[in-house]
Structures are given as C-alpha cells and as structure tokens.
Amino acid sequence: MKRQCALGALEGLPALVAGHAGAALLTADGEVVEGPSSTINPLLRTMTPPVLLHGPATLRMLGLPPEPQPVPWLDVLELFLLVRPGQSPAPTAQALAAMLGVGGAAGPEGLLELAATLLGEALQLALDPQRGPIFQDCLRQLDQAGWSWGPVLADLLMQATSLGVTLPQPARPGSALAVADRLPEWEDEPPRPVPGTQPLLPGEATKRLAKMRGPGFEPRPGQEAYAELAAHAFSERPSPEGPALVLAEAGTGTGKTLGYLAPASLWAARNSGTVWISTFTRHLQGQVAAELARLYPDKAERQRKVVVRKGRENYFCLLNFTEIAQALQARQPNQQGSLMVALVLLARWAESGTEGDLHGGDLPGWFSELFRPAWVRTMADRRGECLHSACPFYQCCFIEHSVRRARQAELVIANHALTLNLAFWQAQGEAYGMDENGSPTRYVFDEAHHLAQAADSVFGLLFSGVEAYELRRWLLGREQGRARGRGLRQRMETILQAVPEAAAPLNALLLAAQATLPLPGWQERLAQILAPEEPAPGPATVLATGETDPGNPATPLAESLPLPGVDGGMAVNNPAETVLHALARQLLLREASQKPGKGQGDHGQDSQCELHPATDELARVAPWLAEELSTLLAHVNRLLAVLGAKLEGARQKPQGQEGVGDAPQPGQDSAPSPTPDPPLDMATLQLVASIRRSLAQRALGPLTEWLAIMKAIAHPPGLEETEGEESAPTARIGYVRRTAEHDVGVKRHWLDPTVPMAQVLGKSAHGVLMTSATLRDGKPEPAPAEGTHSTPHPTPLPAPGVTAWQQAERATGACHFKTSALHGAVASPFDYSAQARVFIITDMAPGMEALAQAYQRFFMASQGGGLGLFTAIARLRGVYERIKGPLGAAGIPLHAQHVSAMGNQTLVDVFREDIKSCLLGTDAMRDGVDVPGDALRLVVFERTPWARPDILHRARKKLLPGSPRDYEDRLARMKLRQAFGRLIRRGTDKGVFALLDRRTPSRLLTAFPPTVPIERLPLAEALVKTQQFLNP
C-alpha cells in the first residue's frame, strides 16, 4: 500500500540528473532526453519542476543561477532530511540507495525510485500513533511555507485515506517547532573526585589493544610497540614542574588510533579520570569515536564514557531557534517560506537523538548548501549571548548537556584549538571559576604536527574593526535596526535583582564602551579610506545600520552621551575608529600590492605591512585609545570583583554551596567586604559564575591584549620580550593587515606559539602524548648522539639523529616543557617500493594551458581517483574550467573546491563514493582528505609547496633557531610528507604522486619514504608509467 501511494504521488513528475558530460531528463510522458545544458535548459522552462538531487550543484552544472528557498524543484535530499533526520550520507544517488536499501535503475529513473522509497517512509511516519501527530504538523508547516514537496505529500496522505487508512489526529498548530518540549532534560551529577595515580604496568597496553581488536586479528608488532610507547604518557609525572611527555611517530598504516586509545582508556577506567583526545581535523574526531565502538559496543555505555566536545558556537541553540521560529510564525504564511522550511527540517533533526552539533555531527554538511549557511550559523550562540541558567531551555540545552557529559566521561574527543583554549582558561581558574570542563590532567594530541598552527590561532591576537565592534555589540546589545542581540545588561537582569551593587560598575562599563569602541557605520567610514573609488558597503555588509532601537536597555545610557561629531561621514570623535583610520592610511602608504588579489597564494594575498616604525599619525592616536582601553579594563575588573566577592561569600556559607565560583584575581580592584545579604539560590549563583566567566573571556582577555598592542605601537622598532622569563628570546611580532574588504587591524603573534602552549599545559598536565605520522620532516641526519632515546620498533630503523628529534620538539613545543620528552618511532608496514611511485615532471611548459593539459592527462591515465592540489585558487579555477568537459565526456566526474556548490567535507564524501571521480583543491585540502582504497590512487601537486612569504613567515625564518633555508625546507618537506601520506592507506593500495615542478630541490625528496622509487622524467613518460602502474 505504501509503495502504491508513493508511486501514485510521483506520477507524471519529471526527473533530472546533470553532470559535466551533459544531463538526462526524464519527461512526464516517460521519455529520457539526454544532451548538453543548451538542450535541457529550454525544456525545463516548459515543464513541471523536476525531481533532482542537490539542487544548487545541479543548477551549477547546467549553468543556471541559484534560486532562493523555497525552491521550485523537488530535491530528494530535502525529502531525506524530513524522513531520516540525524543520518548523514554523501549527497549522491549511490550513497542514498545504499542507505535506503534501494537497488535498480540509475539516472533519473533511479531518483524517482529513491523518492518513492522516502515517500513510503513518510507515510509510515504519518500513520505512527506516537510520531504521527507531530509529523503531520511538520507537513502542515512545510506546505504553508510553499515547500515543493508539500503538494506531493498531501496527495500521498489523501491517497492513503482513500484506501481506508485512518491517520492520527494532527498535533496543535505550531507543535512541530516546539522542539524543546520533547527533548530530555539533563541532570547535574556530583563532581568527580581527583583521578587516581595508578600507573600502567608493562604489557597492559598490549593486552588492552588485543581486547579492542577482538578475536581473529593477527598480531601487529608495530602497533603493539606503539601502544607500549604511548603508555609512558600515563605514568606518574617525573616532576611537579611538568608532565610525563612522549613524542611518538607512527608511520601510516601502523594503527595509531587504536594504539593510543588502548592505554588511554585503560588509565581512565583504572583511575576514574578523564583523558582528552585532541585532533586537528573533524574527520579524525569521527574516526576516533568510531574506533571506540570496538571497546564500548553498547551505545548507552559509549555515550556515558565517550564525548565529542566542541566549542559552544558549534551547537544548536534552542533559544535562538525558538525566537526565530516565533517571529516567523507571527508573519502571514506566504511570508514565512524562505526560512520556515529550514526551521522545520532542523526541528526534525534536533529531536532525532542528536547531540546538537551543527558542524561535523549528524546534521549533514550539505544542509547548509541546500539552505543558506548563514541560517545555520544563526542557530548557534556564536556571539557569546548565552543566558546560561536564566535561559528557559537551560535544562535541555545541548551545550550544557555536552559540558556535563564531558565532566563525567572517561574519554573526551576535541580539536586542538578548543583543547588549548580550555586549558588556557583552566589555568586562570583560581580567578574566574573556570570549572566548565573539569580539570583534565592527561592529554593525547593526535596530528601533533599541527599543534603550532593551532596554538597560533589560540594565542595569536587581533585588534580590528570587526573584533572591536563585536565587543561593543556583546556589551551594549542591539543598538540599531531589527537585528537580534542581547547586551550584557539583558543577560544580567536576574543578577542585578540579587546583586544590586553590580549596577554601578556595569553602567560605567557600558558608558565607557559606548565612547571607546567603534560606532555603528564604522565600516562605511573605513571603506572610504581603504577603497575610495568603490561604493561603500551597503546594509548587507555593514555590521549595523538603521535607527537607534528604543527597546535596547543600553540605549538610555548611550543617549546620555553626546553623539560623536561626524563630518561628511569621515571624521569621528572615537578613539577606536581614529586608530583604525590611521592603520588604514599606514597600510595604503606601505603595502606592496595596491589591492588584495583573490586567487593569489593559498587563500588570497591580503595586504599587510610592518607595524614599526609607526607613522606620526598612528603614534599620535594610539596612546589615546590605550588610555580609553585602560578605563574600560578598570570597569571590567571592578565588575568582576563585585561578582567574585558575591561568589566568595556564597562559598564560605555552611550550606554546601562550595565550588560555584572563586575569589577575585590578585591585583584586581577589591570589592568591599560583603554585608549580610539574603542567600542566593543555586541557579543565581551559577548564573553569576557563568557571566563572570564570559566577561573574563569576552572582555577582559581581548581588552588586555589590545591595550598591549596599543602600547607596543609606541615602542621603538623591535619585538617585545617574553614576559616572565629572565633570558627569553624575542617572542612576539605585530604587523598591520587588511583583514577583510572593508576592515584593517593589527595582528600580533608569538614567533613560537608553542611557548605559551607549553606554559599552559605545563601547569596542569600530568601526562602528554604528542603523536603523528609526520613528527619529523625526513631530513637526512647524522648518527644519533649517545644517550638519545631508542626507537621501540620490532625491527631496527635508520637512525634519524638528534637534530630530527630536536626539530620535532621545536615543531610541537615539547622543547619548552620543563620535563624531557621520550622519543619513539614506528615505521609504516607498507611496502612502498611495490605500492607507490613518485614522479617529478621535468618538461612542464609555462602557462595555464600546459598546466591544465598535464592535470587532464594524468587523470585520464589513472582513470579517475585523482586528487589535484594547488597553491593558488586562481590556477585551480583555471584548470577546472579547461578540463571539466573533456573529463566528463570520458566518464570522469570532476569536483573542485572554491568552484562546486558544495562544502569541503561534502566534496570529499562525494569523491570517496565514486572511484572514477577526481577532486581539485588547494594545498589545505590535503588535511581533510582521508580516502582509502581505489577512490584515491593519484595525487598531482601543482608546484613545490613553499610557505607563503609574508611578514610573519619572514620573521620566524630569521629569528627562530636554525638556518633560514632549513626552516623553509622543513615546512615544505612536511607538506609533501602529509600529502603523500593521503595516498597509501591500506596494504592493498597503490598510488602515484606527481609533482609538476622541475625546480623541486633534491634535498626535499627525503620527505618521501626511503624505499619509494622517485624519478625525474618528462610528462609523456610519466603518463605511460602511471597508466602501467595503476592500470596494468
């Protein structure tokens, strides 16, 4: 019956499949028309909108412009989101068919088969006595919003009722969006005790590993040796000054993930502790979580013991969703469509048992491709506006649930940036009650070759117009227009009732922010300096436009100040804007290129110049901003002190309210001793602690660093010295950078960002494992000096030498810990001499045509399965446009980053699904590609991946230990090693690595495994050998 109704609802609908080689259109009368877009597009204008898969990508293939939601066509992916929420297949017909258990026809007929299956499941949901009422309200909301599947689903239900089926009574209108009413509530649990210190005995990690692998697996000596090496990171720390530190290199194919999970899980279970597993890429986070299913096959147990933790800005915010939904429901139905479809489908996902992760979880990455990415971003708390315990949805909040689960979990999986950021604030815990994530003492950093990059993003600083205006918005809330936004006063309403003494410092802080930070319209004024020949940014690009909002609680404070003078849209009496204007003029005066190019370098060559010596104008106005920032900081510290005193008073009460907050930071303005007050309830105390934590992170931290930047402008040329070290080398550099089309700022970096990382981790960590397949860069070294650590491998390895490990310690920051590191390496088990080839092309002609021809011929020789890597977006696009047609005609689909209407992860998923396809991406794409098997058998690198020669790179090359050339070579070798590591992932894989740069120095070739054959040869000969090797 379900299939009969589904086929009836689809009767007469056309279906469309499009690719580079052309399109296939199934017409309403059953005829299949194949041809190029010039043939298909006119037909589409004369018929009912078709059933298709991934509308934006299909339109891009046909050369048609995108259309806003609700779209006219019937996208099978949208129907999948409705019927199968919480599942995330690749957006291909093959992947959907495998998940739905559908076989049969391909092409447009196959799409109709997929649609019929999904419609049958939709009917089953509508008939379900428990789920049916809410599901029917979903259908009603979607139909009112103009969803293209709405009439089809209505016809489906009508056909079912005509056959005598009785549908349950629909839920009340609007129930579908009241998702919080149907979510479980979390419950607080008592804090975990301090973890034990029981060490792992020799051999225990190997036994745990065998349990995780299960019966029937052959012994893997390399993996077992690696597990025993990793276990040293879970021994007792050698000194109170630093952790037990291990650097472990595991060659590709070793089984590294299980190798460190075995000792980590054993230590956590034995000591009732938590181990944080930190990775750089989202893909590896998912891989780690999947591997733990071996150890915890029971899903409930796995959810208790394993948590994937992300930053708060990644999670679905119920308050944001509800506010937007209520605003939409207040409109007429014909005005709801553009966002209502996305909201209903998000509601279906939110109650599907998800953990609320909007990025990289069980919400498909292609959701934001079908709908606007900005819509998905508005569903998260990206601006620090969380009301915490004052939120009506606090007890079912996805973020709070994740935080609480992480406190009780044995293994927490996170990314490097979050781990380091939380470790930093944990180190400040004595002052700010930073207990949100507990106090982990054991860390595993996988993909440790990226630690410096992650530390650079965490400890690097930026003062810019966007950053400063964002702080203004966080403090003052919505000042103008209809933009949503809650200021600090709104978030503190409950606190002010219970802590009235906080009102005075809060008012002073808001007034100072109004006078100091950039005013609404700042981008328009700055744009007149940066690009006077271009029109100023309109309302879509300016952060705030419109009239003053009388509903904003900060408006009365703002209106008590005289408005700054504005002369012709340029002159403002505002210290932050004045400094931004001075920075912009210094940049225009000194920049090497007149305008930032889109397509130069890895991600576009943005303009930059040295900060010192500052121009007379900048040197004159920076002290003004420094003085105002000092005032702002004083008000922040006073407010923190008042809140801290309230928390300290609550802690000292005998009724068991310990641990909610902490004392003020030494050196802050002290608040008066609290007079006897009525005791605060626990919810209010938790809110005070949360606001205080947010205030420290969102205001105190940035303001402190911006003040340091402004003071540094007045310093003589040179770099600031590291604070707190008697004989530290110069450690920081600041430079002026154009951060966006209409923004400018000062970037301030540590020359070695692993210095603050080691300082932070060294305070709390008892054990740290840093591991990767590419810790060392492969440079030939002398024999190791006497006393260096041995390599725990079942067979001897070539001695890498002291310098190789010293460079690994510098690259990961291990050299900055106060305890020495144990080194060890396990070689890859692969036979690279039989499985891989490296070709360096010696006769590449200059020009785009020759480059495109080389890529095309390599992809043809491999018959697909090729990954093309570029160092410039412009060349990537040029090659794509030239070869997409010929490859498509040969049955080789071509996908491209920065071109296709898909995000990076979706592109990789699609590439993985089709072993005939090829993928083009920038150099950075190599880190997100994990494609074992025949789907990836060829990597073509456009040119030697030298680092981008910007100001920061120049300073690091000059001042960090080692020669400048060695620094350049090491970075290039690491990129080559990582790219080659994508190629061979299994013992049965075969692959070719081609480098289209005859100038590649021989000294870089040690990046490749020593047994892999490397040849310099002409293109024609390389193509023949590629075809013979991959397709004998």
Image: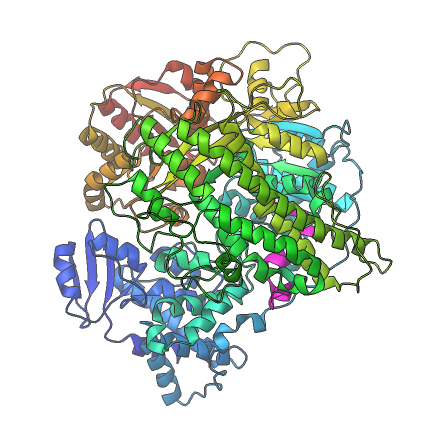
Q: Is residue 991 above or below residue 471?
A: above
| Location of residue 812 with respect to 969 vertically, above or below | below
Quarter of the rendering containing residue 592: top left
Q: Is residue 465 visible?
A: yes
Q: Position of residue 197 (x, y in %)?
A: 80, 38
Q: Position of residue 550 (x, y in %)?
A: 47, 66
Is 821 situated above or below 637?
above
Give the image location of residue 688, x and y in percent: 68, 57
Nearest to the observer: residue 591 or residue 771: 591
Looking at the rendering, the stretch of residues picked out in magenta corresponds to 390-415
Q: Nearer the viewer, residue 600 or 447?
A: 600
Q: Is residue 392 magenta?
A: yes
Q: Residue 382 versus residue 939: which sits nearer the camera? A: 382
Quarter that holds the C terminus = top left
Q: Which residue occupies 64% across, 40% down?
A: 423
The quarter holding residue 579 reads: top left
The answer to whether residue 88 is visible is no
Q: Residue at x 80, y 51 (%)?
A: 673
Q: Which residue is outermost to the right?
A: 654
Tally of numbered tags: 0
Q: Specify the quadrant of the image occupied by residue 442.
A: top right
Please state the horizontal and vertical placement of residue 571, each as a whole percent of the image. 36, 44
Is 320 or 223 nearer to us in this picture? Answer: 320
State which quarter of the image contains the N terminus.
bottom left
Q: Residue at x 60, y 65 (%)?
A: 391
Q: Is residue 910 magenta?
A: no
Q: Left or right: where does residue 1001 sit relative to residue 447?
A: left
